[in-house]
Amino acid sequence: MLKARTKDKTLLVIVYPWLFMLTIAASRSMPPHSGLYYYWLRYVVPALPFIFIALAGGFEFLWSRAKRSPQVPPKLDIIRFARMVAVVLILISCIKLPGQLRFRSGQFAWNCQNMNEVQVALGRWVNEHTPPDAVVAVDDSGALPYFGGRKTIDLVGLNNQNILFNPQLRSELRWNVSTMMNFLKSEDARYLIIFPSWFAPLVQAEKFRENFKMIYHRQSKHYTICAFPQDFMAVYFREY
């Protein structure tokens, strides 16, 4: 009984991270409301070699299970069927595997270069050109706060519960200048670092141009991280 419970818990530990990742990838488009889900694939690419190892181990287990388990008759139909399905699925998945591996390896290299040219570069700029007590509001809080070293507020809500649990506020921050200004003031944030393409109604508004000044920007021309025009990221500053 104890052995069975341990096995069940082990299976849960193995399966849960993958189910969690699949749930996130299937339920969240990036940018929000864009209908684009490719963005999340970049978190899976580095794990592909380990996935292949797991597939190989599972295939070998299915293929030889009848021989290993004396309790299971070698010619049991369900075992033979499982082995056949495993072989067919792996053969199908391998048809385009070589070409896809070449394509994905190049794409992943470009993804890394994109991050260095935009988010990492902006984070280093923040670290070198803003006061130590500066508060920065961003719409992509990965490399920016890591290299920036400043208090950073994620406008998507990753580190701010007021945004995360307030869908109306999260939506209005994308287009309502007054809402954005009031929010930044409440957080004492003077720096706004965003993809203008994500906040097009906001940055195109006359009131925004009157109150915010673009002081720096970065761009990566061959942008492959996401199938969306977000290769240009800008730093805006507002005087209260």
Image: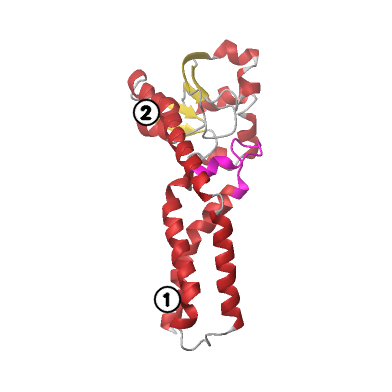
Q: Specify whether 135 is left or right of 203.
A: left
Is 37 one of the magenta-colored residues? yes
Q: Which residues are magenta?
A: 26-42
What residue appears at the point 53 percent right and 39 percent down from the top-left corner?
Answer: 157
Q: Could you tell which of marks 1 and 2 lies nearer the N-terminus?
A: 1
Nearer mark to the viewer, of 1 and 2: 1
Please tell me how many numbered marks the rendered image carries. Answer: 2
- Residue under label 1, please give it: 6
- Residue under label 2, please give it: 148
Residue 193: image tag:
none
How far across and how far down the image is residue 230, in percent?
A: 55, 27
Circle 1 — which element?
Answer: helix
Whether 56 is drawn above or below 141: the answer is below
How far across and how far down the image is residue 212, in percent?
A: 54, 15
What residue appears at the point 55 percent right and 40 percent down from the top-left corner?
Answer: 39
Whole-angstrom CA distance, mark 1 to mark 2, is: 44 Å
Give amino acid for label 2.
Answer: Gly
What residue appears at the point 61 percent right and 40 percent down from the top-left corner?
Answer: 166
